[in-house]
Amino acid sequence: MHGSPHAAVAHFSAMNMPLSDPLENLDADALRALLREREQQLAQKDRLIRHKDTTIAQLTHEIAVLRRFRFGKKSEQLTGVQGSLLEEAVAADIAAIEEELHQLTDHPKKVAPCEQPKRQALPPELPRIEIHHEPHSTTCACGCQLERIGEDVAEKLDDIPGVARVERHIRGKWACRACETLTQAPAPAHVIDKGLASTGLLAHVLVAKYADHLPLYRQQKIVARAGVKLPISTMADWVGVCGVRLQPLVDALRETILTHGVLHADETPIQVLRPDTGRKTHRAYLWAYAPGAFEDLKAVVYDFAPSRAGEHARAFLGDWRGKLVVDDYVGYKKTLGLDGVTEIGCMAHARRKFFDLHTANQSQLAAQALDYIGELYAIEREAKLLHTSERWRLRQEKAKPIADKLHAWMLAQRSRVPDGSGTAKALDYSLKRWVALTRYLDDGAAPIDNNHIEQQIRPLAVGRKNWLFAGSERAGRRAAAVMSLIQSAKLNGIDPHAYLKDVLTRLPTHPNRRIEELLPHNWQPATI
């Protein structure tokens, strides 16, 4: 901004900025610098407001589309298991979007009186456990003793695996007769305001859906046997809101994983049914990322993507640089081409080529290759518990000579077999990737294969048809987030139900700046 100091002062006055003595003493250059800083702040604020408004508009449109589907004729055309799964996904998506809009607008959710759902009374035959919330002191500020004049009771459905019970939260009302003051302990913060479910039940629903592969319509039948009728839409609301509230933990877990210099990556396909396409499914992918098998951090993050394009891996990894353990999928090639990103090949994939060849025709050449590779794995079993430097030394002394011998043998055999044969293909796979396959020999922190991440993907295969076949992209992202926390808890020897119950209880009041404390590898149960 150009002009005289007096013009600058006038501009600040117009912006309702009081001029103090220090400001009046600034020279023209200092005032211009101050103006530029102020304008940059205002421009940044305008960008944030525009981004927020755009996001709100997108979410509002998305929720309108989902509501039209849910209450329209299309939803009635889908029946059976596929219809039930889609109903779950749509209801959970709507609840998740409502929660995101609530967080963006900072306004309390308003429900019209005619739309306010009437909560059913919980069956009286269910066992009850009473939880009392009373003021810390029953002495009034005026010095008089408070008298208990009543109480408020809120009931929440709880679940001890296999047994339903009711938590009765009792908040006593205390009054001072002298100054007519009413005192009452505040209602405990809950991850879902005024929700019917306790955090124990919310955790149970999430673990049953994403770890035990029980869709909500099956869980509904199980709960009904205990005498409780829970609409699928209610349970889906819980899943949707919990997915949004747990996302910051997954974001923090991703950032933690990306601080490590050795990473595993792999991907697996899943089928997704979008509400706007009727019965048509399309193939999406869950990508999995974990620190190297020898790293201290035990964690995994699943990332849902609508395709297998390598851009999704690049987006997840961002500016990360290090050693990436992967198979031969071409989607990683551009990431591996970046400066500072080094490929570690998977010896298990190379071995698999020869194993399949030997299984098909009892190839003696394949048997010899399997023997060589078996010797390399025998050394890895010996090196597994060693320190990084000791593992490197053992590999140099014992494994490297075997690898060199295997390479020379492969080159000799390749010159004797015809192009295009199964044997040639098995040999070519290893020979073309030999540098990547043997990089682990020169780094004690690098693993010999990608089996560690494949073990983290294996649980996903069991649940594919139960939680994503009739879902949506939003449902896919939600599933990836919750499963990241569940599987990471398992890797750290933690019961996922106990972990999620505690985290969901603490989240409403836990400072975001200390979110790392709630990550599975750092988690300590709250002490009462």
Image (tube, grey):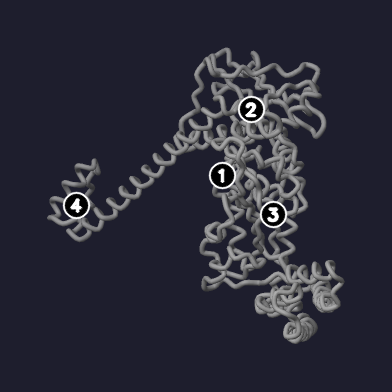
Q: CA distance from mark 4 to mark 1?
A: 41 Å
Labels 2, 1: front one: 2
206 shown above or below 334: above
Distance of label 2 from label 4 (alpha carbons): 63 Å
- 12 relative to 273 in the view: left or right: left
State which mark lies toward you, 3 or 4. Answer: 3
Q: Are marks 2 and 1 in contact (CB under 8 Å)?
A: no
Task: Kindly identify which residue carries mark 1.
Answer: 511
Task: Say the numbered circle drawn on residue 24.
Answer: 4
Residue 388 position in % (x across, y down): 72, 74
Give the number of the mark in front: 4 or 1: 1
Residue topped by disc 3: 521
The residue mark sitting in front, 2 or 4, is 2
The residue drawn where x is 70% and y is 52% is: 488
Tell me the kind of residue under disc 4: Glu
* Earlier-in-chain disc, 2 versus 4: 4
When the figure is inspected, residue 177 is found, relative to residue 63, above or below; the finding is above
Is 23 situated above or below 170?
Answer: below
Please report whichever mark, 4 or 1, sits nearer to the chain's N-terminal start. Answer: 4
Disc 3 residue type?
His
Q: Answer left or right for 193 relative to 388.
A: left
Helix, strand or loop at disc 1? loop
Instruction: Categorize mark 1 by other alpha carbons within 10 Å: few (<14), some (14-19), many (20+).
Output: few
Indicate the position of residue 60 as horizontal and vertical percent values: 46, 34
> To which residue does mark 2 refer?
233
Image location (x, y in percent) of residue 300: 67, 55
> Are the residues flagged by discs 4 and 1 in contact, CB closer than 8 Å?
no
The alpha-carbon separation of the residues under discs 3 and 4 comes to 55 Å
